[in-house]
Image: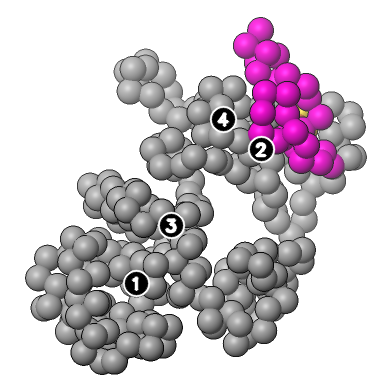
């Protein structure tokens, strides 16, 4: 939300968000309006609340094309319907004149993806795009995102809690805990040799089909921290099996890890320690 300039009035963002030569955090509203929905698009978590409920689907799509591409009404309509067809919405002409509440959750999310793709963005931020959907529709939407990426070359920042989705879609991963990145790296490396205890904990909690009959579901002990009162030092220290004295007072910086990628942890060679 900070990157898109959509934080609530009481929200604050510090640092920089650099995109296409601009710092989005300090960009003027007019600059942001030229970027949003154009070179930078977003697919929100819940399409029911992110589509405008009193506007027909078609108008929400054509508005993007008229505003950012300067198309006339008829050309925008043709392109919007073509895009609905491309994201595999059946009977796109009929859906074009419907309101969001007349569509299923899966179709609404397809409309959101169509809207994001309309102007050929360089980057799409997809925030838990499948959370509100049932499992079958989730798989269809993920296929669609994969297809869109492969066809258009658009980069995607995918925000998700689902490690299966990460494994299936991502090239590079940033694992976050308590609002900070604790580990980054290439997806295969993260799954094979996670370097941060939190990443290890997450992966250990993933249910496996081959031990489902015998193993209880695992969890990471303790509770996620209150973000308004983070513990001092490493935010993960109250839950970390490797906690050391300095972890309780000093916050580890995100630094290059020996096996590639980066990690924010005082431990060295965690994968060796974990394996021993
Ligand atoms: S810095 Fe310390 S508490 Fe934090 S993850 Fe590493 S070992 Fe655990």
Which contiguous range is marked in magenta? 251-276
Question: Going by the image, does 178 lie left or right of 59?
Answer: right
Question: Looking at the rendering, in which quadrant would you find the C terminus?
Answer: top right
Q: Nearer the viewer, mark 4 or mark 3?
A: 3
Q: Is residue 28 magenta?
A: no
Residue assigned mark 3:
154
Does residue 228 lie above or below 29 as drawn?
A: above
Q: Nearer the viewer, mark 2 or mark 1?
A: 1
- N-terminal of the pair, mark 4 or mark 3, is 3
Measured as percent of width and height from the top left, residue 253 is found at 81, 41
Does residue 99 lie above or below 112 as drawn?
A: below
Does residue 161 lie above or below 205 as drawn?
A: below
Work out which residue is located at the far bottom of the displayed protein and give it: 73
Residue assigned mark 1:
118
Is disc 3 surrounded by few (<14), some (14 to 19) or many (20+) residues within 10 Å?
A: some
- N-terminal of the pair, mark 4 or mark 1, is 1
Contact check, label 2 and label 4, Cβ < 8 Å? yes
- N-terminal of the pair, mark 2 or mark 1, is 1
Measure the alpha-carbon separation of dots 2 and 4. 8 Å
Q: Is mark 2 within 8 Å of ligand 1?
A: no
Does residue 123 lie above or below 196 as drawn?
A: below
């Amino acid at each position: 939300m900070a990157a898109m300039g959509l934080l609530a009035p009481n929200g604050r963002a510090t640092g920089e968000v650099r995109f296409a030569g601009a710092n989005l955090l300090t960009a003027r509203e007019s600059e942001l309006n030229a970027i949003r929905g154009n070179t930078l698009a977003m697919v929100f978590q819940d399409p029911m609340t992110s589509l405008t409920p009193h506007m027909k689907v078609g108008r929400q799509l054509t508005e993007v094309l008229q505003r950012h591409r300067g198309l006339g009404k008829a050309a925008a309509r043709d392109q919007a319907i073509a895009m609905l067809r491309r994201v595999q919405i059946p009977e796109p002409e009929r859906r074009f004149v419907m309101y969001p509440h007349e569509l299923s959750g899966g179709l609404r999310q397809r409309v959101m993806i169509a809207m994001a793709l309309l102007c050929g963005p360089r980057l799409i931020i997809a925030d838990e795009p499948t959370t509100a959907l049932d499992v079958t529709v989730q798989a269809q939407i993920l296929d669609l995102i994969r297809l869109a990426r492969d066809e258009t070359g658009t980069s995607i920042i995918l925000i998700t809690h689902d490690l299966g989705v990460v494994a299936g879609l991502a090239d590079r991963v940033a694992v976050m805990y308590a609002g900070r990145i604790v580990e980054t790296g290439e997806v295969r490396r993260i799954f094979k040799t996670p370097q941060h205890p939190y990443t290890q904990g997450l992966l250990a909690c993933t249910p496996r089909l081959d031990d489902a009959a015998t193993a209880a579901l695992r969890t990471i002990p303790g509770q996620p921290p209150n973000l308004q009162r983070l513990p001092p030092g490493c935010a993960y220290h109250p839950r970390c099996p490797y906690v050391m004295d300095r972890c309780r007072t000093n916050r580890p910086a995100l630094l290059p890890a020996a096996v590639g990628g980066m990690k924010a942890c005082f431990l060295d060679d965690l994968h060796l320690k974990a394996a021993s």
